Amino acid sequence: MGSTIRVTAVETDGDTQSHLWPDRFVFSVTVPYALPILAQLRAYLSHRSPSIPLTTFIPDRIRDSDQSAANQSHFRSLSRMLWDGQLVAIVRIALSSPSSSPGDAERHGILLFPTSNSSSVLFGALFLTPADVFPDFVYTQRATHTAAPSFASTYPNSPKEAIGPSLLGHFMGNLRTLTAQFLLLMPIHSTVMQVLRPKIDRRIWHLKTTLITLDIIRNPPLIPTTILLSAVLQQTILDMGGFGFHRPMTESVYTPLRF
């Protein structure tokens, strides 16, 4: 089932370095590409000096009331999924600067995370300067989890390379591979299940595949940059009360973000 989500960036805190954002990247919100480090990240951001730039995203208002309701519902579903697992999604972005080294690709990017106040808000912490690198606990947590199937998780910020047909085909090929492997393997890490089980009443959610695609369309000057965020969510719900079975659901979400 396909659907469309529109999102607006309502405020920013600090320099978002949006000119460094690639035109398209794909990241997963399953372990180890998303980690249960929300509490650690929030503590880090509150004490870090100088502060890390932040961007706030909310679902866009659509004139049609039915479409607007569906738009908000899909956004909240994604937000709640991150919150229930206390997950932070990791988006790695390679910086193109003379001082950059090959290892820097693992140290920079965006950490996407939810808030306890509202499921209608998502935040992005931006680590997009040579001085701003992912905190150490990101690497510590990643090291404790078994490596998942690899895919194009670090992206150049060259518009020509990012939007080329061959690269798009490479992305889609890896997307199909990752989906197939996650459908065959244990769909969610046991650490995350320990967090989810107390929060879900008599239900087990098997998050088979959860992928996020962020596309940036660079427009001419004076026209706001548009970002397309797509999420592929596939989940099987087993109702433990009546042992009812619900068919797997797939949602494709494309989200414009206006700056």
Image (tube, rainbow, N blue to C red):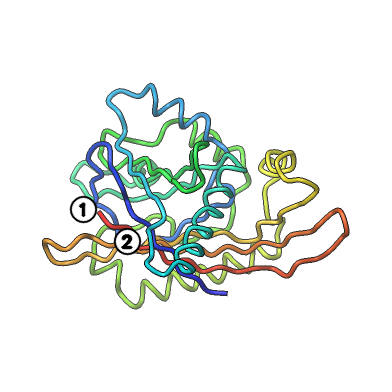
Task: Rate crowding at label 1 as few (under 14), some (14 to 19) or many (20 or more) other CA atoms within 10 Å.
Answer: few
Taking the image as shown, residue 188 lies to the left or right of residue 225, namely right
Residue 170, relative to residue 236: is it above or below? below
Between residue 188 and residue 69, name the one nearer to us.
69
Q: Amino acid at mark 2?
A: Ile
Position of 150 compared to 85: left or right? Answer: left
Instruction: Give the CA distance from mark 2 to mark 1.
Output: 12 Å
Look at 30% across and 62% down and name the residue there. 216
The residue positioned 56% from the left and 38% from the top of the image is 143
> Can you give x and y, in whole percent of width and height, for residue 168 in the image?
38, 73
Position of residue 74 relative to residue 81, above or below, is below
In the displayed structure image, the side of residue 232 where residue 219 appears, left or right: left
Q: Which numbered disc flags the more N-terminal residue, 2 or 1?
A: 1
Q: Secondary structure at mark 1?
A: helix
x, y percent for residue 1:
58, 74
Amino acid under label 1?
A: His
Q: Residue at x 30, y 23 (%)?
A: 49
Q: Are marks 2 and 1 in contact (CB under 8 Å)?
A: no
In the image, residue 172 sits, relative to residue 120, either above or below, namely below
The residue that mark 1 highlights is 19
Q: Which mark is residue 48?
A: none
Q: Which residue is mark 2?
A: 227
User: Which residue is at the far left?
Assistant: 221
Identify the image quadrant of the C terminus.
Answer: bottom left
- The image shows residue 17 at horizontal and vertical percentages of 23, 46
* Numbered disc total: 2
Question: Residue 128 appears at what percent x and percent y?
Answer: 29, 43
